[in-house]
Amino acid sequence: MELVEKVGTIQEEHLKSFEEKIERGDAIEPRDHMPESYRKHLMRQMSQHAHSEVIGMQPEGNWITRAPSLRAKQILLAKIQDEGGHGLYLYSAAETLGITRTEMIEQLHSGKAKYSNIFNYPALTWADIGAIGWLVDGAAIVNQVSLQRTSYGPYSRAMVRICKEESFHQRQGYEIMANMMKGTKDQQAMAQDAMNRWWWPSLMMFGPHDSESPHTGDAFKWKIKRASNDELRQKFIDKTVQQAEVIGLTIPDADLKWNEAKNCYDHGAINWEEFHRVIAGNGPCNKQRMAHHKKVHAEGAWVREAAEAYRLKKGQ
Amino acid sequence: MATDTQLASWEVFMQGKPGANYIHAGSVHASDKKMALQNARDTYTRRGEGTSIWVVPTDAIVASNPDDNDMLFDPANDKAYRMPTFYTMPEGAKAI
Ligand SMILES: [Fe+2]
Ligand SMILES: [Fe+2]
């Protein structure tokens, strides 16, 4: 009985020290006491973030062999290699929470862990590579800049590293779009078509409206999340509209207009039905993305096995 | 038959420029030292971020327990005589 009470007090003290740290704005480190629900929340969020980086290599990888110049091919390769690196930073950071990489990959393959919905859309033309870099990486940057101040130390440090690398991603995409808009009528139409297809899914990347978002409460209290979905989405819209205007692209939203009083853009309704349909597995490429990941993972098993066998043989 | 694993974890420390301290960059997975170094290079220095890399098996890192912080880090605060400003220098003494 006494022992039970003691355990209770120790747990309370741990929670108190955790909450005080959060309150002061100190980072939480892997060995610090943290509530189980904080750990779980981070495991889910960070592993899904890592999976998104890795799955995100697929739509772009599709264009490496068809890049229109050697310069374009080198840039695309470097960009995709960065995304693989981002996945690795995030898997490592998530591992500090006590989940193994094997478990994370199993959760991805079983469908328990999700990845960003955006990568379930296909990259149909070269202009899509421009739109992905400019809009998809652009939206990701807005989210990731905010996450640099997230409360979990390893996650925050990974975000700082990622943000340094991301600005080239967005600029190379915008450059592709700008060049196409300086080209022939067909090239301009191709750029506008990519814009039309990627704009709305990019807005959906920020997740449901604040009024609908189920995890928001704890994530804010614990400073995992530092800005709301709607705040981040608004930031992205406000900076992107001007960029589109400069190169002559039209935002495919008839209701988009500047709101003088709020000092930001008002936008039209987002098609949440589509968002939920794609999350549920019925987007254009869900099955293809997952099948490809599983295939490559299985085909790489012999390499990992050979590396282990080599280590054992050398007695290391 | 060997079972599939994600290989062992290694911590990566990077020296940003000659003469600087080695700073923790993150971790990688690898089966041996050579692969760990190669993976650390590919993962953490694609833009000239480093001039030298250390890799250490994650298991070999010994970390302090946050519960011991008072014991480990507080005593330094009340030993002002460890600071140069603690001492009174004779009037007129130069370059000390
Ligand atoms: Fe990325
Ligand atoms: Fe990126």
Image (cartoon, coloured by chain):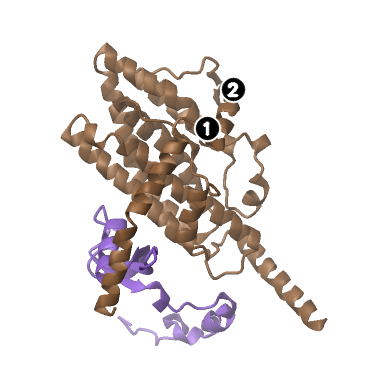
Chain colours: A brown, B purple
Respond whether the residues carrying marks 1 and 2 are from the same subunit.
yes
Total label count? 2
Q: Is residue A211 above or below residue A34?
A: above
Label 2: chain? A
- In front here: A226 or A124? A124
Q: Quadrant of residue B57?
A: bottom left
What's the residue at 45%, 60% (across, down)?
Answer: A101
Mark 1 residue type: Asn
Label 1: chain? A
> Seen in the image, is A242 located left or right of residue A316?
right
What's the residue at 39%, 85% (across, down)?
Answer: B91
Quarter of the image that includes the C terminus of chain A:
bottom left
**Sequence order check, earlier mark of 1 and 2:** 2
Residue holding disc 1 = A282
Pick out the residue farthest to the front. B1
- Residue B84 at x, y percent in the picture: 42, 82
Q: Is residue A276 above or below residue B39?
A: above
Q: CA distance from mark 1 to mark 2?
A: 21 Å
- Residue B48 at x, y percent in the picture: 24, 56
> Seen in the image, is B65 located left or right of residue B39?
right
Residue A269 bears which disc, if any?
Answer: 2
Mark 2 residue type: Ala
Q: Is residue B51 above or below residue A228?
A: below
- Residue B56 at x, y percent in the picture: 34, 73
Quarter of the image that includes the N terminus of chain A:
bottom right
What's the residue at 41%, 42% (across, down)?
Answer: A291
Can residue B15 be seen in this snapshot? no
Pick out the residue farthest to the top. A185
Give the number of the mark in front: 1 or 2: 1
In the structure shown, which secondary structural element does the residue marked by tag 2 occupy?
Answer: loop
Can residue B27 be seen in this snapshot? yes
